Image (spheres, rainbow, N blue to C red):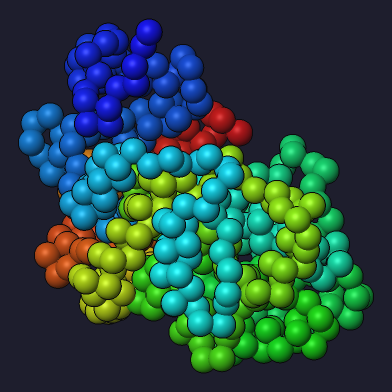
Amino acid sequence: MTTARSASEPSRTGSFDLGALLAERGAERYELHTRYLNHQLPRMLRTIGFDKVYERAEGAYFWDADGNDYLDMLAGFGVMGLGRHHPVVRRALHDVLDASLADLTRFDCQPLPGLLAERLLAHSPHLDRVFFGNSGTEAVEGALKFARYATGRPRVLYCEHAFHGLTTGSLSVNGESGFRAGFAPLLPDTAVPLGDLDALERELRKGDVAALIVEPIQGKGVHEAPPGYLRAAQELLHRHKALLIADEVQTGLGRTGAFYAHQHEEGVEPDLVCVAKALSGGYVPVGATLGRDWIFRKVYSSMDRVLVHSASFGANAQAMAAGLAVLSVMEDERIVANARSTGELLRTRLAALTEKYELLADVRGRGLMIGIEFGRPRSLKLRGRWAMLQAARKGLFAQMVVVPLLQRHRILTQVSGDHMEVIKLIPPLIVGEREVDRFVDAFTAVMDDAHDGGLVWEFGRTLVKQAVAHR
């Protein structure tokens, strides 16, 4: 007869040893990825010299095997809002595992999801209920379904150049053709230009629009909705009995210097709000769709429909504990205020460089979501080099800046989107003046080199060859 092991008793059986496995096979990381996962990723990383091996991470930094530190200005595409391995989030996850909760029974109501929903909704007093899933695209999928069902209408409007995810529903409201190509047929949704109220009203007059989904600041290119647009769009939508969906997956939870980016504009109260990324603390996938009570009551209109929209791992204890810990840290450490002040410092210092460098066209954004855009220079010598890159592939100059930032200055950044001459900065929200100084000093050095005709352009020629070879 066997007896159950107590929760506090460690297992004495089994051969799995994670530390030993990583010690034995960790050096094969790029080969394993090439063989079993997306084979183009290692190829791309090696081409641009990003095939680094990071041994550990903490806060806003990585370290390699030689002890060199790397400043993270990417935050895992925004997931690491509190930086890596925040001690409060780590402790919460240890605590929830040690508690041995009866999680995901599916026939009870655990306290953690309700507690996290309560904390989230406190930042959106006009909203009433939350659905928990596992990712940003899943949060968007939920919002699309809820909007269609609640309004009884089939079509959702989205903005050109938007990014709302890559699953089929969210791909249907993705404004980047490169992501959509080859995956048709998608849902019959319609793009309108960001900020164009006339285009929005023309579509609404057709009477079949369920909602407009919009990023208050688009991740692709870091383009902010014009002042007054969200409020006016909301009024138009409600007049035509349609809903406003705010995709705050990247802009939410303090990224822009407000808890939600739509809160920068007075009077904007979206009917549905999508969040994810930073809510996870970087550990456990979690996404959430927040909405008005009447919308949820329509979707879940009877006991027969109790599981009409659900997720197998949604609201699991680890995700809920991580989310609660993240919101607690945000309050205790004044994360939103830090994003606002540090972002203003970084953006102001970078914007001052537009007078010095003719290749630097614009610096924009809010909080710690900043876009650095490059443009056609005035001088004849630089115009020739710029034209060479543009002829090969738009976006190569921005990549030319990103690469030496990593290789020479050990700073990780990203180009904001395909065929864009924009670098996007979305660092952990805990960065401060030291990180601002390091980035601005490094960026200035790279721009000096670009204007002087140094090694940056040597790498540019390599990129041109790669671009031409893969047309």
Answer whether residue 384 is visible to the viewer in this image. no
Q: Nearer the viewer, residue 155 or 15?
A: 15
Which residue is depicted at the point 83% across and 43% down?
185
Left or right of 358: which side holds 391? right
Which residue is depicted at the point 62% across and 88% down?
231
Q: Nearer the viewer, residue 321 or 41?
A: 321
> Where, by quadrant of the figure, is residue 33 drawn?
top left
Q: Position of residue 308 (x, y in %)?
A: 74, 50
Judged from this view, the residue extending furthest toward the left is 67
Answer whether residue 145 is visible to the viewer in this image. yes
Q: Nearer the viewer, residue 178 or 34?
A: 34
Q: Position of residue 339 (x, y in %)?
A: 29, 72
Q: Position of residue 452 (x, y in %)?
A: 24, 57
Give the vertical position of 302 relative to 404 (above or below). Answer: below
Which residue is depicted at the point 30% across and 58% down?
325
Q: Check the picture and name the quadrant holding the N terminus.
A: top left
Give the vertical position of 179 relative to 202 (above or below). Answer: above
Which residue is depicted at the point 71% across and 89% down?
235
Q: Nearer the viewer, residue 7 or 116?
A: 7
